[in-house]
Amino acid sequence: IGGATLTVLEIAAPAADENAAHGPLPGPPPSAPAPASATAPRRRRWASSLALSVAAHAAALVVLVIALPEPPPREPPAVLTADLAEPEMRIPEEDEEPLPPPRPEDPPEPERPDLPVPPLPVDPDLGRVRFPDPPPEPDPAPPPSKPEPPPPEPVRPTPPPEPARKPPIGLGSDAPHVPATSFGKDGAKAANAKASELLAAEPDGAAALATARSGAKGGAAVWVVAGDYDHAEVVLHGLGIEHAVVRKDDLERREIPRALRVLVYNCTGKALDDDAQARVSAWVAEGGTLLSTDWGIERLLAKGFPGKLAPLTHAGRPVMTPDETVEVRADGDDALLRGVPRNGATCRWWLEDTSLPFTAAEGADVRVLVSSDDLLRRHGAPAVAAVFPWGRGRVVHLLGHVYQREGNLRGAVLVQRIVVNLVADALRK
């Protein structure tokens, strides 16, 4: 039991009655029976030995059960099933449908021939098989770089909305009799003379011209500072307005006479000294009228009349135009625009090489008289002609020249009519 061994200590002889039942034991004849007094102690010894043996084995069994380790859990035996019996042959009954014939077994798959294995190269120096080096792993492709955002497009100033047109001022304000005939530099002299004739032929223009001529008689009321590039004196001469031509040095050496009513400062590369600029500024404040052209914005107005107009700059440098013409239009109902061509064919205005576009200071009392969308698109500032008050007088500035060297007749008439209106209004006071 549990690996224990049972040892038989003694086997007692069977009793007399047992022997009698089974017959005599083989062997020599038994001797004379022992007396009853001797048999009884032997049976008691046998019973006692048997009891001790049973007790000892029981104690050993208990010790073994306690000391033995718990056996590992036994896995359930795998059940192997095999259908070894032959299929039972069964005869169908008469009314039973016969079984379908057995399906033919699938044909055995044909054996595939062994593919030839190329021999492995043997390194002759080492005498052993040389396995080919594995192909190099390709470098991991770098992650796609984020495309750079396109550079922002430069912000272009949008042209200001065109103001509502008011009824034309004066007769012939649309100048229907002025053609849009173009001219070049070789025909500038004839074109400016023709523009003066067209202006005088218009009734309202003729009236303004008559006022200017009568007030300027004698030449003391109108001065023209000789310039290097513009020649407004040629235009005044063609219009029949008397004037005096002075040099820049004359303004720097002498006081401005009280009889002077209009000062035209031609485009020049020479700037007035500070004292002369201060005298001109004071003269305008007392009621004078100043007309400057092109480079006058830098040579006279920027310092003599601060806080009004300034040259247009980009990255700290002044913006300059090429030799070009731009399409222009008259804006507003200022008296200086009386009778100028407004409707009909296009007015074109000439700008010399290195003309200086200008802007008005923020908050300045400046009115734009003539503007150009072409100028705005090309250079960033639309103003072509502007006016601002200064004390009891006023200042008018023109981009480009009074003497138009290129463009068309409508543009030349537009420039000359502004000059005539300016002189007539100044001499009428």
Image (spheres, helix red, strand yellow):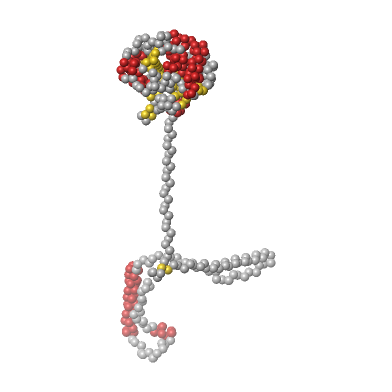
- Across and down, in percent, residue 28 comes to 39, 91
Nearest the camera: 257 or 103?
257
- Across and down, in percent, residue 425 comes to 43, 11
- Across and down, in percent, residue 369 comes to 44, 19
- Across and down, in percent, residue 6 comes to 36, 76
Farthest residue in the right direction? Answer: 94
Whether 176 is drawn above or below 140: the answer is above
Residue at 47% across / 20% down in the picture? 189
Residue at 32% across / 15% down in the picture? 279
Nearest the camera: 268 or 284?
268
Q: Is residue 322 visible?
A: yes
Whether 65 is drawn above or below 401: the answer is below
Q: Relative to residue 147, is residue 304 drawn left or right?
A: left
Total numbered circles: 0
Residue at 42% across / 43% down in the picture? 146
Residue at 67% across / 64% down in the picture? 97
Nearest the camera: 31 or 222?
222
